[in-house]
Image: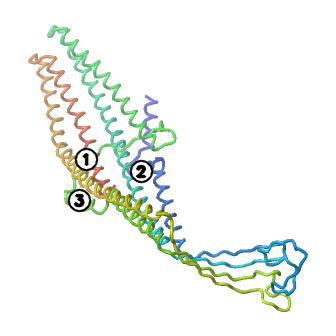
C-alpha cells in the first residue's frame, strides 16, 4: 500500500495538460524538428537570393613580385624601370589595395529570388502540416492514456462485481437454493474479468509509454493526464468552413509550389536575355604602396567598367530547360487542384464524424444507465429465485460493454473534434 501511495503521489506531480503535452512533444519529435529546420533554412535561402540582387563590396589587397629579365622599359608611373619576366605583370613590384563594387543585373537573378521566396512559403506550410500531424498524434495518444486508465478502472469494478456475484452464488448453494452449476458459471465469469483486468492494465501501460516516448528522455517517467471532461459543444458547419477556408496548409504548400515553378519557368527563359555586369574599383595598383609615386605621380584612383554578355548559341540547352520547368509547373498545378479537392472532402468527412460521435454520446450515456438498471433488477430477481445465473452474467456483460462503449465513444468524439480543430488551425 505504501508503494501504491508513493506511485500515486509521483504521478500527481507529473500531471500534464493537453497544451503542455503538445508543446513538450514539439520540442522532442524528430520529424517536426526536421520540418522546422527546413523552414528556417528556406527562409535563409530567400534572404540570400534577395541579397544576391544587391551590389557586393570587397576590399582587395595584394602584393606581387616578379623576377626581372635584365632589361628596362618605360612603363608604369616611375619612367624607366626594370622589366618583369612575365609580360602579363606590369612591374617587378606591384601593390594592389582596392575597394571593389560589383553588380550583375539580369532577369534570372530576380526570378531566382522569387523561387526562393516561394520555397520559403512552401516550407512554412510544410512546417504547419508537420505540426498539425504531430498535434493529431499527441491528441490521440493523450486521450488514449486517459481512456485506457478509465477502462482499467471499469474492469476493476467488473472484477468486484463478479466476485460479489460469485459470493452470492456460493451462499445460495450452501443454503441449497441453487445448483452448483451457478457457482461454476459465476467463477468462470470472475476469472474472465480478472484476465480482462490484466489486459486493461497492460494496455494502459502501453499507452502511457507510447506518449512518454514523445515527452521524456526516459519513457518510464511517471505522469498522468487530465481526466476526461464533459464533451464540449460542436461548432456549426458554417463556422468550421469559414475557419478552415483561410487556414489550409496543404493548399498553401501546393500554391507555393505553383508559384515556385512559375518563377522557375521565368528563370529558365531569362537565359535568352543578356546580363549586365557593372564594376567600380577605387584604390591603388602601383609599384609603390603609397598614395603618390616618384615625382608626386598619383597612385590613388578609380576605374569603372560595364560588361554586357549576350547569349548566342547553347545547343538548345535553354529551350530544354524551359520545357523541363514547364513540365514541373503543370504537375504543380495538378497537385494544387488535387489538394483543394482532398481538403474539401476531408473537412466534410471530419465534421460528419464529429457530429455523429457527439450525437452518440447521449445514447451511450443512456445505454450505461439502462444496463446498470438491468443488472440491478436481474440480481434482485436472481436473489429472489426468479432468474438464472446466465441472465445475471448476460446483464453483467451488457453493463461492461456499455461502459466500454461509452469510453470509446468519448475518445472517438474528442479525436474527431481535435481533427476539426487541427483543420481549422485552432489547435
Q: Nearer the viewer, mark 3 or mark 2?
A: 3
Q: Quadrant of residue 70?
A: bottom right
Residue 11 relative to residue 93: left or right: left
Crowdedness near tag 3: few (<14), some (14–19) or many (≥20) residues, C-alpha within 10 Å: some
Q: Nearer the viewer, residue 249 or 271?
A: 271
Residue 399 x/y as whole percent = 19, 29
Which residue is tagged 3?
A: 241
Q: Measure how far apart labels 3 and 2 are at the Cα level.
A: 28 Å
Say if 337 sits above or below 408 in the image.
below
Q: Nearer the viewer, residue 212 or 280?
A: 280
Which residue is tagged 2?
A: 20
Residue drawn at the location 22% of the way across and 35% of the way down: 405
Residue 345 relative to residue 106: left or right: left
Q: Nearer the viewer, mark 1 or mark 2?
A: 2
Q: Nearer the viewer, residue 36 or 371?
A: 36
Crowdedness near tag 2: few (<14), some (14–19) or many (≥20) residues, C-alpha within 10 Å: few
Mark 1 secondary-structure assignment = loop
Residue 207 x/y as whole percent = 38, 36
Which residue is tagged 1?
A: 230
Amino acid at each position: 500500500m505504501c508503494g501504491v501511495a508513493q506511485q500515486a503521489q509521483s504521478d500527481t506531480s507529473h500531471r500534464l495538460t493537453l497544451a503542455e503535452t503538445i508543446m513538450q512533444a514539439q520540442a522532442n519529435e524528430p520529424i517536426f524538428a526536421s520540418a522546422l529546420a527546413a523552414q528556417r533554412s528556406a527562409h535563409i535561402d530567400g534572404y540570400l537570393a534577395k541579397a544576391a540582387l544587391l551590389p557586393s563590396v570587397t576590399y582587395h589587397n595584394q602584393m606581387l613580385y616578379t623576377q626581372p629579365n635584365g632589361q628596362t622599359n618605360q612603363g608604369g608611373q616611375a619612367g624607366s624601370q626594370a622589366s618583369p619576366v612575365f609580360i602579363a605583370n606590369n612591374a617587378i613590384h606591384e601593390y594592389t589595395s582596392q575597394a571593389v563594387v560589383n553588380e550583375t543585373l539580369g532577369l534570372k537573378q530576380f526570378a531566382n529570388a522569387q523561387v526562393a521566396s516561394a520555397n520559403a512559403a512552401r516550407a512554412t506550410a510544410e512546417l504547419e502540416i508537420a505540426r498539425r500531424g504531430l498535434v493529431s498524434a499527441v491528441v490521440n495518444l493523450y486521450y488514449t492514456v486517459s481512456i485506457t486508465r478509465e477502462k482499467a478502472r471499469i474492469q476493476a469494478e467488473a472484477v468486484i462485481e463478479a466476485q460479489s456475484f460469485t459470493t452470492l452464488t456460493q451462499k445460495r448453494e450452501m443454503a441449497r437454493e441453487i445448483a452448483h452449476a451457478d457457482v461454476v458459471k459465476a467463477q468462470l465469469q470472475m476469472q474472465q474479468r480478472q484476465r480482462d483486468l490484466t489486459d486493461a492494465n497492460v494496455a494502459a501501460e502501453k499507452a502511457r509509454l507510447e506518449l512518454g516516448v514523445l515527452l521524456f528522455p526516459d519513457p518510464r517517467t511517471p505522469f498522468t493526464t487530465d481526466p476526461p471532461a464533459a464533451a464540449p459543444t460542436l461548432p456549426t458547419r458554417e463556422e468550421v468552413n469559414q475557419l478552415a477556408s483561410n487556414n489550409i496548409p496543404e493548399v498553401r504548400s501546393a500554391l507555393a509550389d505553383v508559384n515556385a515553378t512559375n518563377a522557375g519557368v521565368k528563370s529558365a527563359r531569362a537565359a535568352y536575355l543578356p546580363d549586365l555586369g557593372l564594376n567600380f574599383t577605387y584604390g591603388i595598383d602601383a609599384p609603390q604602396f603609397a598614395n603618390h609615386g616618384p615625382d608626386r605621380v598619383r597612385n590613388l584612383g578609380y576605374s569603372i567598367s560595364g560588361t554586357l554578355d549576350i547569349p548566342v548559341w547553347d545547343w538548345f540547352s535553354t529551350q530544354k530547360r524551359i520545357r523541363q520547368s514547364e513540365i514541373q509547373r503543370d504537375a504543380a498545378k495538378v497537385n494544387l487542384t488535387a489538394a483543394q479537392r482532398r481538403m474539401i472532402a476531408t473537412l466534410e468527412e471530419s465534421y460528419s464524424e464529429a457530429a455523429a460521435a457527439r450525437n452518440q454520446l447521449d445514447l451511450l450515456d443512456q445505454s450505461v444507465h439502462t444496463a446498470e438498471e438491468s443488472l440491478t433488477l436481474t440480481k434482485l430477481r436472481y436473489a429472489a429465485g426468479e432468474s438464472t445465473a446466465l441472465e445475471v452474467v448476460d446483464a453483467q456483460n451488457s453493463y461492461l460493454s456499455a461502459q466500454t462503449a461509452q469510453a470509446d465513444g468519448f475518445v472517438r468524439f474528442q479525436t474527431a473534434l481535435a481533427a476539426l480543430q487541427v483543420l481549422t488551425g485552432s489547435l
